[in-house]
Image (cartoon, rainbow, N blue to C red):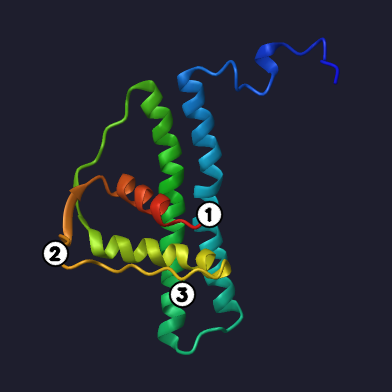
Amino acid sequence: MSQDPHRTAAQGDGSQSRTPSGQVRADLLARMGHELRTPLNAIIGFIKLVEDGLYATEEERRDYLSSARQSALTLLDLINNILDFARLEAGHLTLERAEVDLVQMLDEVAKTLAPEAHAKEVEIDALVQAGLPRRVLSDPDRLRQVLNNLLATR
């Protein structure tokens, strides 16, 4: 195997010359594709179910459309997170502190991930343990991102 004489070490695969912040950026970009695809696949899946008439009742159709809307909002949140990353690097990121309905958020995340999970023949459901506080103080976007990462099928 011959080396390209015009290629410098900095132009290689980057694994040897990455700085810690460069590694963080590379890791973020690697995860970003999955995180963006998950809600987008859910949107496509729910819309396809409605287009194909694969619902038993009008209520189920509305539920599919509501889940598609929630997935679109999740996608918007992810895009906002990408923009937050730029703010973080610039030292301008602040965390939100708000009351979050944890049970509702778990249910929304599970519904968002359900089409992708079902396509892989994986059942996904949000079971809440007794005693779990319903409301918590948190940054809603960051919490949703963590839950998506924990529950996403890979």
Q: Viewer-proximal residue, 106 or 76?
A: 106
Q: Amino acid at mark 1?
A: Arg
Q: What's the mark number on residue 51?
A: none
Quarter-of-image position of residue 44? bottom right
Residue 79 % position (x, y): 46, 44
Q: If you read the primary sequence from the N terminus, does the residue marked by circle 3 or circle 1 appear first?
A: 3
Element under disc 2: loop
Do tag 3 and tag 2 residues touch (Cβ < 8 Å)? no
Q: Viewer-proximal residue, 103 or 76?
A: 103
Element under disc 1: loop
Residue 62 % position (x, y): 43, 78
Q: What's the mark number on residue 154?
A: 1
On the picture, is 14 further left or further right than 43?
right
Element under disc 3: helix
Q: Which residue is mark 2?
A: 131
Residue 99 % position (x, y): 17, 52
On the picture, is 64 further left or further right than 134?
right
Q: Amino acid at mark 3?
A: Tyr
For the residues labelled 3 and 2, the Cα–Cα distance comes to: 30 Å
Q: If you read the primary sequence from the N terminus, does the residue marked by circle 3 or circle 2 appear first?
A: 3
Q: If you read the primary sequence from the N terminus, does the residue marked by circle 2 or circle 1 appear first?
A: 2
Residue neighbourhood size for the residue with mark 1, other residues' Cα within 10 Å, grouped as few (<14), some (14–19), many (≥20): few
For the residues labelled 3 and 1, the Cα–Cα distance comes to: 23 Å
In the rendered view, tell whether residue 94 sits above or below residue 140.
Answer: above
Tell me the residue at 32%/25% (across/down).
92
Tell me the residue at 16%/58% (across/down).
135
Quarter-of-image position of residue 18? top right
Residue sitting at the far front:
1
Q: Which residue is mark 3?
A: 64
Q: Amino acid at mark 2?
A: Gly
Tell me the residue at 43%/35% (across/down).
83
Residue 66 % position (x, y): 41, 70
